[in-house]
Amino acid sequence: MNATPVLELLDPASLTIDVNVRKIAALTPEFVESIRDLGVLEPVIAHRRDEGTVHVLMGQRRTLAAVEAGLGTIPVMIVSSPDEADRIVTQVVENVQRAELSEADEADAYHQLSLIGVPAADIARKTGKTKAIVESALKARSSTAGAQALHNGYTIGQALVLAEFDGDQDATEELESVIRDEPQYLEHIAQRLRDDRGSKQDLARLTAELQAQGTTIVEEAGHYADSEAIRVDALNRADGGPATEDDANAVQIVTDYRGGHRAVPVITGWKDLGFTPKYERYDGGGQARKGPMTEEQKAERRTLIANNKAMESATKVRREWVKTLLARKSSPKGWQYFTVHALTHHPETASGYDSKTAAEMAGVKNDDWNPLRAHVARTDARPEAALLALICAGYEKQIHKDSWRRPGDVHRDYLNQLVTWGYTPSDVEAIIIGTTE
C-alpha cells in the first residue's frame, strides 16, 4: 500500500468493485437506511488504475449501500494498486475480523490464492489460519460436491465430508440428514460410511476374482444337516474321513465385524454326494435343536455384528479426537486428576498401554519399536501431553469391539472424561456410558 494515501470525495456510482471474497453483500434495509441518514463514516479503501478507474478494495458493502441510498459522494481513501494476492488476503483478514465472511467466501478466497500460486502454508500464515483449515477448505472447494455444499451454507468441515462421498446418493442423503438434525454425530456417521464403503469395495473385488475363476458362490452355508450347503470343515466323507478343501464345489463369502471378507470352502448338495455332517445342532443344554435360527436369534446376531462394526468406526473417530485434543497448546482442564485417578483406580492403563497408539495420539512420528518411549527420551517438551497420550492409550487397550455388551468402570471412566472435555460419543459408546434411552 502507498505510504501517503489520499482522501477524496467521490460519487459511489462511479466506483467499480473488484471481485471480492465476500460474494454476498448482505445489504439489509436497516443498513441502507443508516447509510442514507448518517452517510459513510469510515472511508472506503480503493486504488486508481492507469486508465483512471477507481476500484474498491475494502468497503464493498458500504459502497453498494451508498449507491442504493442515493448518496452523491462518499469518502474514499486512494492507495496504490496492491499485489493481487495481498489484495485478496487483506479482504479475507478484514472480513473475518468483522465476522462478515462466510465459510463459502473464505474457501473461495483460498481457492483464488491457490490459483495464482500461493501455497497453503503461505495462505495460512498470511490469514492467521492453521494450515489444516486452509487445506481442508481448498480440498472441499476443489470438488463439485464440496463447492455446492459450501454454496448451500454448509461449513468447510461439513462440505469436506460431503465431497468425500460425491456420487453416493444414499450416503449424501444420510449425511445431510445428520448435518440438519444431529450435526454433533457427523464424524461418527461419516466414519461408519467410510468403513462400509471400503468393505463393499473389497467385497466387490473378491466376488469378481472368484467369478473370474469360475467359482460357485453360495449366499448361505451352515454346519448342520438343515443347510443345503455346509462348510467343508463340518463334513465327513462317505468313508468317515474329514472332508477337505479339495472336496469343495463352492464357496461362501463371510464378513467379519471389521468388514473384512474371506471365501470359505463349502459343499453344496452334500447329501447327494455322499457326505455327512460332523455335528448335530446343540443349544448348550443337552438337547439337540432342529431347524434354522429363529427370527429373534437372527435379529440378535445382526445387532451384535452391527454394534461391533460401529465400535470399530467409533474407535477411529475417538482416537483422532484425542489426538486433536492433545495437539492443543494447553492441556485439557482437570487432566492432572484424570491421570491420578487412572493410575490409582485402573493401573493397567499405565502398565499395559500400546506405545504405537500412544505415539499416534501424541502426534509422534518415528519408526522405533517403542515410539512414545523414544520420543520422551529425545525431548522434555510438553511431557503432560505424552503422559495423557500414554494413559489414554492404556484405556483404549481396554476397550474392545464388544465392550458395549459388558461395560465396566474402566470403560465408563474414560469415555465420561472425554465427554467432559467435549467429545460426542457415538450411539454404541453411549451404551457403554449408560446414556441411551
Image: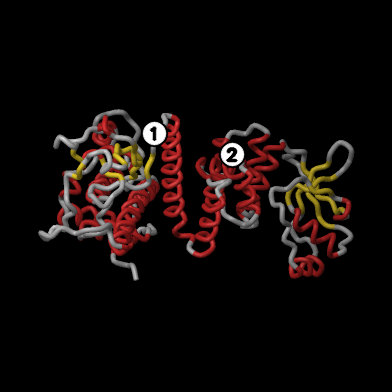
In this view, 428 is above or below 82? below
Picture coordinates of residue 431 (x, y %)? 30, 63
Q: Nearer the viewer, mark 1 or mark 2?
A: 1
**Which numbered disc flags the more N-terminal residue, 1 or 2?**
2
Residue 53 occupies quadrant:
top right
Is label 1 in contact with label 2 (beta carbons under 8 Å)?
Answer: no
Picture coordinates of residue 14 (x, y %)? 88, 51
Picture coordinates of residue 42 (x, y %)? 74, 57
From the viewer's perspective, tell me whether residue 366 is left or right of residue 4.
Answer: left
- Amino acid at the residue labelled 1: Thr
Report how far apart the C-alphas of labels 1 and 2 lie in the structure: 55 Å
Q: Name the residue under label 1.
A: 215
Q: Residue at x 67, y 35 (%)?
A: 115
Q: Which mark is residue 123?
A: 2
From the viewer's perspective, tell me whether residue 133 is left or right of residue 317.
Answer: right
Q: Which residue is drawn at 29% across and 39% down?
A: 267
Mark 2 secondary-structure assignment: helix
- Amino acid at the residue labelled 2: Ile
Q: Is residue 378 visible?
A: yes
Given residues 290 and 130, the one toward you in this image is 290
Q: In which quarter of the image is the N terminus?
A: top right
Given residues 347 and 67, the one toward you in this image is 347
From the viewer's perspective, tell me whether residue 76 is left or right of residue 154.
Answer: right
Residue 246 occupies quadrant:
top left
